[in-house]
Each structure stands twice: as structure tokens, then as C-alpha cells.
Amino acid sequence: MLYAIVDIETTGSFAAGNGITEIAIVIHDGVKVLHFYESLVNPHTPIPYFIQRLTGIDNNMVAKAPSFEEIAGQVFELLQDKIFVAHNVNFDYSFVKHHLKNHGYELDTKKLCTVRLARKVLPGLTGYSLTKLTHQLNINHGQHHRAGGDALATADLLAIILEKDVNGVVSGMLKGRNSEQYLPPHLPVEELESLPSSSGVYYFYNAAGKTIYIGKAKNIRKRVRSHFSNNKTTRQKQDFLRETHRISYKECATELMAHILESAEIRRLWPVHNRSQRGYLPEYGLYSYEDMQGYKRFAVEKIRRSFKPIYTFNTITEGHLRLRELINGFGLCTRLCNLSANPDCGCSDHPAPQVYNKKVDEAINWMRKQLPTFALIDKGIDDNEHSCILVMDGNLYGMGYLNDKQQQLKNIETLLKRMEPLQDNDYIRNLVLRHATEYPEKCVSFVP
């Protein structure tokens, strides 16, 4: 059995948008080096300054180097029919496979990750980066962050792993298409195997224990696996492979509850790799206040955390449309609703504050009556319970589980005690209201 130990230097962290600047391949029989190949590569794109500082490879060094297209055939021949080995193998493999494919070569070999192998065969070490391993194992490590030096050091590490592997870890990794090979090198496979096949929300954590991504799924285990086992060469996949050290989850009874919890948790924790829902928070609110003359006034303004709006809107235009609806329906003053700057707006003779304010209160009460209070009841995680999503005055209050549906739905006060409050936003509120409209038989209404 022959191994091709590979190390590359690149212009960035993911294959789809970056080039290779250097590649080294060590052909190894498990005991000794049989062949060594190394070449700088012209990526035909500028090398970022911080990468130049890290690797020592600058734009001048690669200016006259061959492009990857020129060496692709030679690289493919060296890798063909070998076990592809690298320290954090999914990174190197994704780059090499992607760039070979761009030039007509389809790489499909078995892989071994020396990070994952070292953790299993050499447990208890203080660290498993290549630098820390070579220091602890007295491996000669030449130029750090250069393809040749790192590949030769990884080859020596592989030889030690093969020698110490008395439990058949390497052969186990090579059986079939071992799914463990696709996982982040620092993620214990036991965490993945312990994930349930039910609906819920999952969390990815980095080495410091910080949440870096939150997702929802019908089948948590299947969805988490898909993040790592696909053939994508995107930034997100490489970020997940590099940064994920731990996974946790929360089961949910229904897909809707998983959707709500995902959205609420993203807004609570704002993980660095969750970008898609950052625009769903409402920007404007309808506020009521009393001026110096004692008149209650309306205003549509940007959301302010210290004041709770009567109603929220995605745009200021939506807010002004609702205000005009109230003006026409309750005979309110456009100036006192901040929709007219003209003091002679035609309503300068409006009644005294106590009379006018009654109209404002009627308008507020009317709006609140348009906002329903109801519980959305569905199946539970277990057969002896029901799930419940509670909407109060048109806003999501929270969700939870009921073990005595008839008793706990008797009044709103009893129900509130069973609910876990969640932060409301337009996105999840509309999800719930749309679901309630589609399945009215699941709704239990409460009349204020």
C-alpha cells in the first residue's frame, strides 16, 4: 500500500475561490520515503499580504512558476492509486480535487487525516497541530507553512502512527467509504453518532466553546452529516471543517418549532456563520406618547430598544399607511400623528385633550383586537404530551409542551406558566400566523 502525503499553500481558505501557490507530494510506503515532489505554483491572482507573511511566498516568487494547469497531469499521476494523506486532509483534498477537475482530471482516492489518526492512536498529547505534534514526537520539521517542510514532517508523523497502531485504526478508517474521514478533524465521531434522527436545532462550536453556526433540520443527524460529506468547495464548508470542535442539539416536536427556535437562537447568539436571517428584524415601530399640551400622539419611528412599539413594520411606508387608516377610521389629526408639519392642517379646532385622547385609545384598542391571541397545538416529542406555540396580541410569546392539554388550556394564565418566552420578530411571527391560517383546526383562541 502506497501513501501520497500532500501539503499545499493557497491564496485563501476555500477551493472554489482561491488558487494554489505551492504543492508538495511525498510518496511513502509506510516506512520510508520513495519519492518527493515539490513545486511553486502561479495562481494568477494576487497573494493576500497576511498569507505572504505566514508562508513567505510572495507574488514575485510565483511570477515565473508553472500554473496548476501545467503540472496537473504530473500531480494526478503521483496521486492516482495512492492513499491521499494530509494533516487536516479535507482542506488539501478539496483544493487538489477541485483544481484537477478544472483541468480535466477526476481524482477519487481514499483519504487519511493525520490529525484524526493521531488523536486515536496517540491519545493524551497536549495538542494535535502539526507544529505541536512534531515537537512532542521529536520529528524534524523543516520550513513551517511551506509545502515541502510540512509534507515531509507529516510523512514522518504517518510512519509513527502506522508503527503505533496496534488496534487497526488506520485499516478501519480505510474500510469502504468511512464517513469519519469527512468530519472536521477535531470533532469526535461519537458526537455525530449520538445525534438523533428527529426534528430540531443543532449548534456548532469552535475550540473556545463559542457558537459559530445554528441550523434546523427534519433529521438532525442526516442534516449535520450533509454539511461535511458533500463535495462542495465553498468557504462555508471549509470554515466548518476548520472550526467545528463540538456539536449539540435541541429536539423539537415539529418542523415549525424547529424553525422558530432556530430563528430565535440566531438572534440571541448571532453566530458568525449565520448570515441569511440578519435582515428579518423589523426596522420601524408605531409609538404613542403624550405631548406638552396633553394630547396623545402617534409616530412611526425607527425601533428603539428601550420602548415597546404598539405595532412593527418593515418599512416606514407601511407604518404611514397604517397611520392614515387610523386617521380616516377614528377622525384623528394628521398633525398629531406626525404626518403633517403644517399647523393649519384643517384640524386646528380639534376637541380638548381628554376628548381627543379617547379617540386615540379607541384606535389602539381596535388595533390590538385585530391581533389575535391563540395557542397552536400539535404533536409532542413523546406520545403523552402536546406541543404548544403561544401568540399573544398577534406577537409570538413563546412555546413549550403540555402534559395535560385540557387542564392547561383552560385559561391563559395557566398556559403562560408552561411556555418558554422567545423574542418576537416579523419573520417567525409570519411563519406562525401562516401556519395557523393553513391549519385552523390546531388553534385554540383566547378572547381578551
Image (spheres, rainbow, N blue to C red):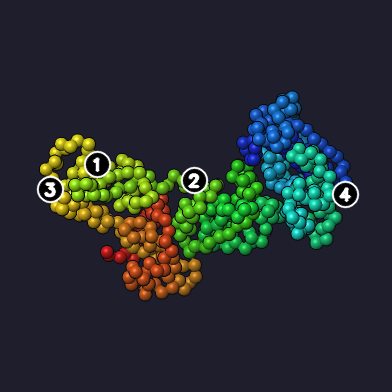
Mark 2 and mark 4: Cα distance apart in space = 49 Å
Mark 3 and mark 1: Cα distance apart in space = 18 Å
Residue 31 disc label: 4
Q: Earlier in the sequence, mark 4 or mark 3?
A: 4
Which one is nearer the viewer's eye here, 338 or 440? 338
Q: Earlier in the sequence, mark 3 or mark 1?
A: 1
Which one is nearer the viewer's eye here, 211 or 8? 211
Report the residue at 71% width, 43% height from top. Answer: 93
Amino acid type at circle 1 is Asn
At mark 3, the secondary structure is loop
- Residues at marks 2 and 4 touching, judged by CB atoms closer than 8 Å: no
**350 w.r.t. 429: above or below:** above
Query: Residue 116: x and y, percent?
Result: 73, 53
Mark 3 and mark 2: Cα distance apart in space = 49 Å
Query: Residue 137: x and y, percent?
Result: 82, 52
Q: Earlier in the sequence, mark 2 or mark 1?
A: 2
**50 w.r.t. 115: above or below:** above
Residue 276 disc label: 2
Amino acid type at circle 2 is Ser
Q: Earlier in the sequence, mark 2 or mark 4?
A: 4
Left-right relation of 211 to 357 = right
Mark 1 and mark 4: Cα distance apart in space = 82 Å
Left-right relation of 35 to 229 = right
Residue 226 disc label: none
According to the image, label 1 marks what residue? 338
Report the residue at 62% width, 56% height from top. Answer: 246
According to the image, label 3 marks what residue? 351
